[in-house]
Amino acid sequence: MTTPTDVLELLDDENQTPTAVITSMIREAMAVADGTVPDLDGLREKLDDAEELADEHGSDPASRAALRTVRLTPLDPQRPARDMLEDLVTGIRGCWLLYREYADRSDLDEDADDQAYDEMDDEIDTAFCDDVRAEAAAQRHRLGLAPAPDRTADTAPGHTTADHHDDDDEDGVPYTFDLEADDICEQITGAVVDTQEPDLPRQIIEQILTIEDDEAGRVLAQMIARGLGYLAHMKESRMATAEFDAAVNWVGTQFGVDYAGPAAIMAGVAGHRESQRILAKQLGVKHPTIAQLSDFLGPDLFPATIWLCAGLVETVGDGAVSWLQQYRPKWTA
Amino acid sequence: MTRYAVDETRNALIATWDTGHGAVAVTVADLPAALPSRKRMALATELSGLSKALWRCYTHPASAAGSAEVNTEGWRRQQTRDGFAEVADHVRRPNLPDDNGTMSVSYDPVEERAHRIGRVLHAAADTDLSAAIIGEVEAEVAAVEQAELGDLSGRAIQCVQLTRQDASPVQVAVADEILAKDPLGGDELFLDLDPTAACVAAAHWLKAAADVVSGMSGRPARGRHGGRQHRGDPGDHADGRAGTA
């Protein structure tokens, strides 16, 4: 079942409305039901991928045949809309399960009884529903059911500025970041390049999380999305493999292998084929979702993006962070 | 779509359609004893065919075809849809063979099915049967029109089993309300709504849920490769907002 992933990718990458994403996928499945192939280029790509996979992993005729199987649509062409609805609801439940896994149960001590656990589970479920409702309400204009928010009007509550002071790090350089600025990722990358301090993005995230504010989660999600936006642009512009190699090598020699690994994974997101292959082996999917990536990298999803960017700035961009600007994602209100 | 069948035990014509869960049937008309079996079957077949053509206008609306230029798919769909008002009239006064044995046949699937029903009724020549069938055809046309407006009451409920190329904003709003009540998706999504519209709303809520989880997983104190949280394993703390919310 790849439908929820496909839908999220289209919503995120192409910035399409839910109506456009859903109706186009459903129309494709209906075309398949009518016996036609709606997307020749997409089919060609699938055929190539299948051949590639079969050549690589098809050790015997049976596995070759299995790998060379191509689906014309991810949906059941007999009943595309209901099939998709089932998949999407399953996807929402998957998020709920992940949320429960991430949830903090530290308030409970070791000998807490079952009832205490049940109550905690109920609280977590309620928190999930509340968080999702808040997020859905904030984006409701995308359904065409509410007017788009006025960007200039929401600066007051949405504008979070975190002063970054390294209280417990004597060598720390005080930096002030406007976390909601368009170029926040460039600012942080610049700071990492200047200070050669790779833990800076980690500290910023910790800093955000200490803010007792419902905005914190949103600001963080926005920063992660902005970071991934650069990688998506790099992927579109098909940056050379050698450039990613150089950047990851730089991160490795400068910061150590613990930083190079996550940076390499983000290079896979940015289109680096070798990293994609590693990613595919580790995660079992070729195009991982944000949820899968963050599951894999944990809290280092955003820092890893910055490490890769810093490596690219140092190697491809001749140390000038302005080089990164060409990949800055464009945000439409 | 509504399917029509001859109930042989009761000598009646019945109509049946799907709902969100199971199918229902109603009696359309008692069949006159004089009507031969082949005519009965023809009546059921043509009525089912008309229903299929009518509901195709719902699942394949002109608005989803792109262009509405003359002789395009969109234009053909609109022509068919524009003919809904005359469907019952075609059943009342079908095209019949003229004195030379020639007869006009429409290229429009809805219109032609209506004429065929009319010809079966013309041959049966039974006023009660004709009145009942015309009433049935009008009810079916009305159900499709009602579904187009996002009202799935009565027999229009059958469209919860159909796949439509477009999403009615009314249905999207209803689905959005259901998900606001229960973000995990209640049964109503599958029982009471057009599935394409429900998918549009569900995609929006899936994205919200994914964003909530991805924002949360950026939190520290969770092992880099993610330790599962188990009951009775308090050594592995995750620093999430949820527990205290």
Image: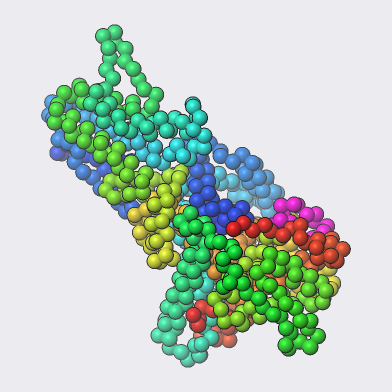
Residue B173: tell me if it is visible: yes
Most distant residue in the front direction: A153
Taking depth in this image into account, of A50 and A299 the one nearest to the observer is A299
Residue A82 image position (x, y, % from top left):
42, 51
Residue A184 within the magenta-colored segment of the rendering: no
For image coordinates 29% across by 11% down, the residue present is B101
Q: What residue is shown at x 46% (from left), y 72% (from top)? A: A130
SS assignment for the magenta stretch, majority: helix
Residue drawn at (39%, 52%) of the image:
B171
Residue pushed farthest right? A318
All told, the count of numbered labels is: 0
Does A311 sit left or right of B84 as displayed?
A: right
Provide residue A258's location: percent of width, then percent of height: 76, 74
- In the displayed structure, would residue B217 be above or below residue A2? below
Magenta segment:
A232-244
Residue A305 in view of the camera: no
Q: Classify A139 as above or below B80.
A: below
Q: Quadrant of residue B8?
A: top left
- Residue B116 position in % (x across, y down): 29, 25
Pick the residue in front: A295 or A180: A180
- Up-down: is B119 above or below B62? above
Q: Is residue A240 magenta?
A: yes
Please identify the quadrant where the N terminus of chain B is shown: top left
The front one of A56 and B33 is B33
